[in-house]
Image (cartoon, rainbow, N blue to C red):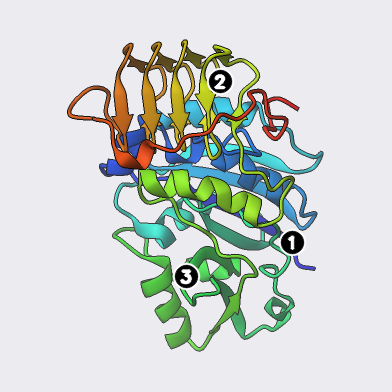
Amino acid sequence: MRSASAVILVGGSGPSLLRSSFGMPVCLLPMPHAASLLAAWVELLDKNRSISNITIVTGRRDDLSMIQEAIDRMPRREGCSLRAMIDRNEHRGTAGCVADAMRDDTMDDDLLVIEGASLAPEKIDSVMDEDMHDDSVEGVFMRTPTSEPAGLFLLKRRVLDLVPDVGFFDLKEQLAQKVVSSGGRILVRPISSSLRRITNPNDYINHLTEIDRQGRRNSRGGPWIHETAQVDPTAIITETTLIGQDVQVGQNVVIDQSVILDGAQIGSDALVARSVIRAKSQVPTRTRLVESMEIGGDARWNNRATGLKSLPLGNPEFTGRGRS
């Protein structure tokens, strides 16, 4: 099997409504079975012995320190390096960003490029295509079972020579076309599981259960409660709910199909349904939030929030830093 270095792209330099909604890098959103979306990718890559280096590239300078702090806590096998860096040039496109990040790298292995806003699959064995040994093959683009781009690309490093030093240059549109026009071949291969992209807050909530449906470590669908969270015994927490680190949940709170990010405080008698509560925010007592990203506003009781059932807290399904 050919060796490869992995490049995970986790956000451009321009404004991002999704990042603004969450108040944090999308790649650091917690997952049921990993500390974050990014941690799940790193864990997956770390298991593959053909991956020797992992580089995480962000276009946002204010995100770099948070990402670096997160990867400093991630375990990794000996011989696999892990680093985070800032994209040095704005508005360069996917291929331009990868070329800039790897320009000073002296390795001659393949490049596995990952668009990091997708859930990590169960395995990437099918991505490391043996047809890359064919000298005419310059890359492998993975597609989902529904024939959509999967956000996974295996490239021979030499194709980066086709990327101009300045200007926007996309990987799927411009680089692939230039490879083919130069006489090279780009293969398209299916990946066994659909890589779900997080494009809005609803995606995030909905995809929490996708991990369980893929047959990972359990199939009960939560709730997932971090071991440092303080949840009052009278609170009702339903399935498909994730409660992050150092969260405080008061008396008689109802949380249904929601994500409470690290450090948030939920006041007594509050209802949170189909919502994402930003890190370190406060939901006042008796507040009712339904399908909301905001604190306060015109959030009211909604029929979709009825029919709630109580589930035991401290569910052993939470992993990473959670209960075990």
Give the distance between the C-alpha atoms of the residues marked 3 and 1, in whole angstroms: 23 Å
Question: Compared with residue 88, is residue 122 higher up or lower down, i.e. above or below?
Answer: below
Q: Amino acid at mark 1?
A: Ser
Mark 1 or mark 2, whichever is nearer to me: 2
How packed is label 2: few (under 14 Cα within 10 Å), some, or many (20 or more)? many
Under circle 3, the secondary element is: strand
N-term-proximal mark, 3 vs 1 = 1
Give the distance between the C-alpha atoms of the residues marked 3 and 2, in whole angstroms: 34 Å
Q: In the image, which disc is placed on residue 3?
A: 1
Which residue sits at x=30%, y=19%? 287
Q: Amino acid at mark 3?
A: Pro
Per the image, the residue denoted by label 2 is: 245
N-term-proximal mark, 3 vs 2 = 3
Q: In the image, which disc is placed on residue 151?
A: none
Q: Amino acid at mark 2?
A: Gln
Direction from residue 50 to residue 35 in the image, left or right: left
82 or 321: nearer the eye?
A: 321
N-term-proximal mark, 1 vs 2 = 1
Q: In the image, which disc is placed on residue 149?
A: 3
Which residue sits at x=58%, y=13%? 233
Image quadrant of residue 16? top left
Image quadrant in which the N terminus is located: bottom right
How packed is label 1: few (under 14 Cα within 10 Å), some, or many (20 or more)? some
How packed is label 3: few (under 14 Cα within 10 Å), some, or many (20 or more)? some
Under circle 1, the secondary element is: loop
Instruction: Tell whether label 2 touches label 3 (CB within 8 Å).
Output: no
